[in-house]
Image: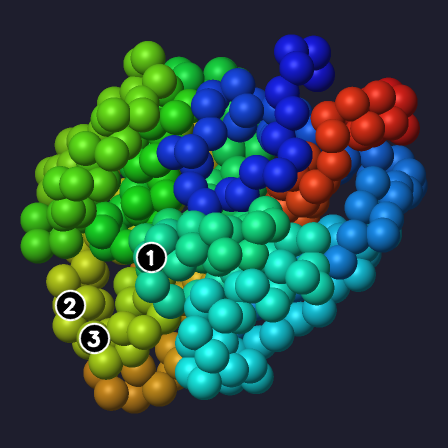
Amino acid sequence: MNKAPVDLKGRSLVTLLDFTPQELRRLLDLAARLKSRRRAGGAGALLAGKNILLLFEKTSSRTRCAFELGAAEEGAHVTYVGPGTSQFGKKESLEDSARLFGRFYDAIGFRGYGSCETVRDLARFSGVPVWNGLTDDDHPTQILSDLMTMEEHLQKPLAEAKLVFCGDTRNNMAYAWIYGCAKMGMRFVGYGPKELTPDPAVSARAAAAAAPGAEISFSDDAACLAGADVIYTDVWASMGEEDRIAEKARLLAPYKVTQELLARTGNDNVLFMHCLPAFHDFETSTAVACRDLGVDIREVEDAVFRGKHSVVFDEAENRLHTIKAVMVATLAEESAWADRVETASS
């Protein structure tokens, strides 16, 4: 573990752009040790006495479970306020809600609509750390999990890795990856239609915060797949875009992740990654309903999703360990947990 003093207590996780590469490395190292300790049967109480609010405007599986289980395993209490179950933003303003929440809770996990500014405002008015569990323009906790998964599988440092994001390169996952690659000095290629190229401001923000060696580019030419270490994709229509499913499927069908696409990387060990949930078969009501309307929304072939290159469930598991690391690192002094975790997992 990196012994350099990196105390993240009291910090919010709004976007990875707010963190230095050294701070992100500290979170990844802590997540790895927490995972090792858990697999060895160890238990902790690093969040004992803490009360955490999960304020979710959007539905969730992995993010909610990771926050709730991670907090419970470290001794914290969690209150979950799900979609449509509070007055937040309806009969009560963000500021008024945040001021109340800050008096009840030690931290807030937020997942919702709007931009990262919603998370910043929650932190400003509540006075407690707020963690971004997904907004319309970012998904930092997912990227931490993905970076951890890459380190577990790649035979090279992150700074030498090339990631190609296939599909809609202006959705929140693409933006989150642009920021993650910039901070970790990685190569990011957005492979998708020109109509869905990101706002130039996104690339500008990433460039301003980029570590040495980072490269961000976009292409609609399959030649960009060559040499990729990771092929990444996401669903073609994000939450709130249900009325655009047919349009997006037509536009993005050429960028579907297939075995042929993987072969074009020229890398027998290329990883396939996905934040989940994924449309890869017709075992969901949504995929069937779209198929019945003549629309195939599967962004990845089933053979790829279930194949040897896929590490999607490793990613999903690592949501628990990285989110737990974020909670521990931002709610406790570094000196209070570093030795305890290190000793328990050594």
- Image quarter of residue 44: top right
Disc 2 is placed on an element classified as helix
Q: CA distance from mark 3 to mark 2?
A: 10 Å
Q: Of the residues under marks 3 and 2, which one precedes in the sequence?
A: 3
Left or right: where 12 falls relative to 66: left
Q: Is residue 2 visible?
A: no
Q: Find out whether the residues at labels 3 and 1 contact each other: C-beta distance under 8 Å.
A: no
Task: State which mark lies toward you, 3 or 1.
Answer: 1
Left or right: where 7 falls relative to 242: right
Front-most of residues 184 and 98: 98
| Image vertical order of residue 96 relative to residue 260, above or below | below
Q: CA distance from mark 3 to mark 1?
A: 20 Å
Name the residue at 14% across, 53% down.
196
Q: Where is residue 289 shown, x and y percent of the image?
A: 35, 86
Q: Find out whether the residues at labels 3 and 2 contact each other: C-beta distance under 8 Å.
A: no
Q: In this figure, which residue is indicated by the disc labeled 2?
A: 250
Q: Where is residue 81 shown, x and y percent of the image?
A: 61, 74
Q: In this figure, which residue is indicated by the disc labeled 3?
A: 244
| Image vertical order of residue 229 relative to residue 307, above or below | above
Name the residue at 64% across, 53% down.
107
Q: Residue furthest left?
A: 194
- Indicate the amino acid at tag 1: Ser
- Indicate the amino acid at tag 2: Arg
Name the residue at 40% across, 58% down.
118
Q: In this figure, which residue is indicated by the disc labeled 1?
A: 115
Q: Quarter of the image containing the N terminus?
A: top right
Q: Where is residue 38 shown, x and y percent of the image?
A: 83, 40
